[in-house]
Amino acid sequence: MPPAPVTPEAVLAYTKPTSGWMCPLNANSYGIEFLKFEIKDYDTNRVVYQVAREPDPEPLPEPLDPEVENMIRSVKYTFPASFLKFKTVRTLLEFCVGPKPAPNLRMIERHFFKDKLVRTYDFEFGFCIPNSTNSWEAIYDVPEYTTAQINDYVSHPYAHKSDSFYFVDNKLIMHNKAEYQYARD
Amino acid sequence: MGLLTIIKKVKQKEREMRILMVGLDNAGKTTIVKRLNGEDITTISPTLGFNIKTTTYKGYKLNIWDIGGQKTLRPYWRNYYEKTDALIWVVDSADLARLEDCKAELHSLLQEERLFSATLLIFANKQDIASALSVAELEKVLDIGSITKRRCRVVACSAVDGTGLREGFDFVVSDVSSRIYLFS
């Protein structure tokens, strides 16, 4: 029996980080590519993280070496511990879409610390125009962490993990992971 | 607990508004959104898709959909009408050559059933340019008088120096909130 399709409802019910990938790389038949990601402290405009790239000139070879695949699909962040004290954060994501329209794009991101769910982001981009370049900038207030919590995050590098799921019309087309460590400033 | 109470609770918790920003290309839509948040506006390139901005304004969470206005992109606007609480139409008040085009696009947009209940704000942008038409002149040229049966306001603004932007967004937010958050 084929495995049940991975729906938004299914990933919203996950209680710990995934092991493995919930969809193959080639599930992204819409040619969605991330071009830029930026995290800033809203109050000081200080850049905490910034990465930008050009769209891939050609598709990736298949089959892909699992190690290479893991490298492409996961990222390790090192943030300053002061990041946990920011009141307001500004994130910017830029992505492009291939020649097919992508109806109803939705992102669900699940954050875990020590295998316990700490936060969920759920955002509907909606329709994406073929061959478009789009951006999403979010300015949001961060819940306050206690000193004990901050110490906990700092002393457990990479215990903070996230799974990012992208759906087009409720079908999973991308799954990426991230791990975070916090360094004393 | 009645249904109304439940709806009220959900809305109060979220207090979200969806704002759709459209208009001809080069009207200044992206610049307005950036300027509103005090960001750098020196390097803005034409929008070839959408720019979504999630931000808070006066205690409300705004999701602003700024969609590219180039001719090839306009047929896609209709994909963004659903659930729109407010429509912001941006006009380049100094682009006299395209005002007829602007008027035609605006009035065809207003025929759209899914936008009937949306608050309408028209930003008469680029007032910092000497040749820009005034609000009164624009209202005439764009035939704003024929827009009835909906809340509508034309606000003079300049995305470059920031004048008028707050006034416009204040109108949008207070009008939408008075309509949706009736009980809050």
Image: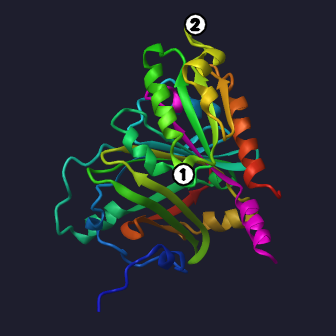
State whether residue B159 appears in this view: no
Q: Position of residue A22 (x, y in %)?
A: 37, 75
Which one is nearer the viewer's eye here, B140 or B14?
Answer: B140
- Name the secondary structure under disc 2: loop
Residue drawn 60% across and 19% down? B140
Q: Chain of mark 1?
A: B
- Can marks 2 and 1 be said to lie on one chain? yes
- Name the secondary structure under disc 1: helix
Q: Which residue is mark 1?
A: B114
Q: How much space separates mark 2 and mark 1, taking CA atoms?
A: 37 Å
State whether residue A162 appears in this view: yes
Q: Which residue is mark 2?
A: B130
Which one is nearer the viewer's eye here, B5 or B164?
Answer: B5
Span of residues in magenta: B1-29
Q: Give the crowd class for mark 1: few <14, some 14-19, many >=20 residues within 10 Å.
A: some
In the depicted structure, whether residue A29 falls above or below residue B91:
below
Q: Position of residue B56 (x, y in %)?
A: 68, 46
Circle number at residue B157: none
Q: Are marks 2 and 1 in contact (CB under 8 Å)?
A: no
Q: Position of residue A63 (x, y in %)?
A: 17, 69
Q: Give the crowd class for mark 2: few <14, some 14-19, many >=20 residues within 10 Å.
A: few
Q: As drawn, is B184 to the left or to the right of A127?
A: right
The amino acid marked with disc number 1 is Arg
Residue drawn 59% across and 72% down? A113
How does the figure colour the protein chain or chains? rainbow
Based on the picture, tell me whether residue B2 belongs to the magenta stretch: yes
In the depicted structure, whether residue B115 falls above or below residue A178:
above
The amino acid marked with disc number 2 is Ala
Residue drawn 83% across and 57% down? B184
